[in-house]
Amino acid sequence: MKKILGVDPGLTATGYAVVASSDRGFRLLAQGTVRTRAEDPLPDRLGKIHEELAQVMVTWDPEGLALEEVYLARNAPAAMFTVQVCGVILLLGRGRKIFSYAPRTVKRRICGNGAAPKQQMMKVVAHLLGEVPCTDHAADAAALALCALLEDEG
């Protein structure tokens, strides 16, 4: 059984999902969303994300980590915070295989359409896993993990 931790990075909400692949298909092992408060200092917010995801890494010991690439064109100041979250996550992935995907690539690999709406993505992810992820952030993280597992198989 191969396990990948998918992470949908965000300073306010970081979604995560540990997905396993075996000869019987895919299985969602763990999922959640790390939430931080805007009024807390940045180091505390990054620390909370690090601590919670570090515990996931220790508990599930995934072989790899799949991360969404940051898209800077919409809101550069907000993207800079997301980049800092990505740095924290990449540190957690040291010594493991790292996968990185643009949002359109994830949609294309999971749904066959790079412009698939969020509801379609969530429906396909739920079908592949046999259960609905708890939040849209966790669903995005599960889709990232599925992409990595599919890529590693192919």
Image: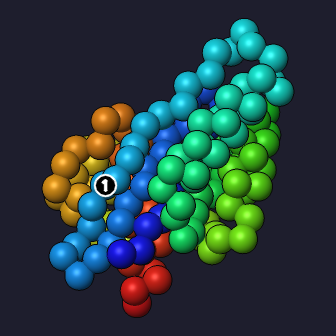
Tell me what residue is drawn at x 64 percent, y 45 percent: 54
Q: Mark 1 points at which residue?
A: 28
- Is 116 rendered above or below residue 78? below
Residue sitting nearer the eye, 125 or 19: 19
* Side of 100 where 91 appears, left or right: right
Q: Position of residue 134 (x, y in %)?
A: 31, 36
* Side of 77 where 153 appears, left or right: left
Work out whether residue 115 can be spotted.
no
- Is 76 rendered above or below residue 24? above
- Farthest residue to the front: give it: 59
Quadrant in the picture for residue 90: bottom right
Residue sitting nearer the eye, 135 or 97: 97
Tell me what residue is drawn at x 27 percent, y 61 percent: 27
Type of residue at label 1? Leu
Q: If the image is split into quadrants, where does the C terminus sit?
A: bottom left
Q: Position of residue 138 (x, y in %)?
A: 41, 43
* Side of 115 where 45 appears, left or right: right
Q: If the image is split into quadrants, where does the N terminus sit?
A: bottom left
Assign a secondary structure to mark 1. strand
Quadrant in the picture for residue 31: top left
Work out whether residue 110 can be spotted.
yes
Q: Where is residue 96 in the image (x, y as percent from the top left)?
A: 65, 71
Tell me what residue is drawn at x 58 percent, y 52 percent: 58
- Is 30 rendered above or below residue 36? below
Residue sitting nearer the eye, 13 or 91: 91
- Farthest residue to the bottom: give it: 154
Tell me what residue is drawn at x 74 percent, y 64 percent: 94
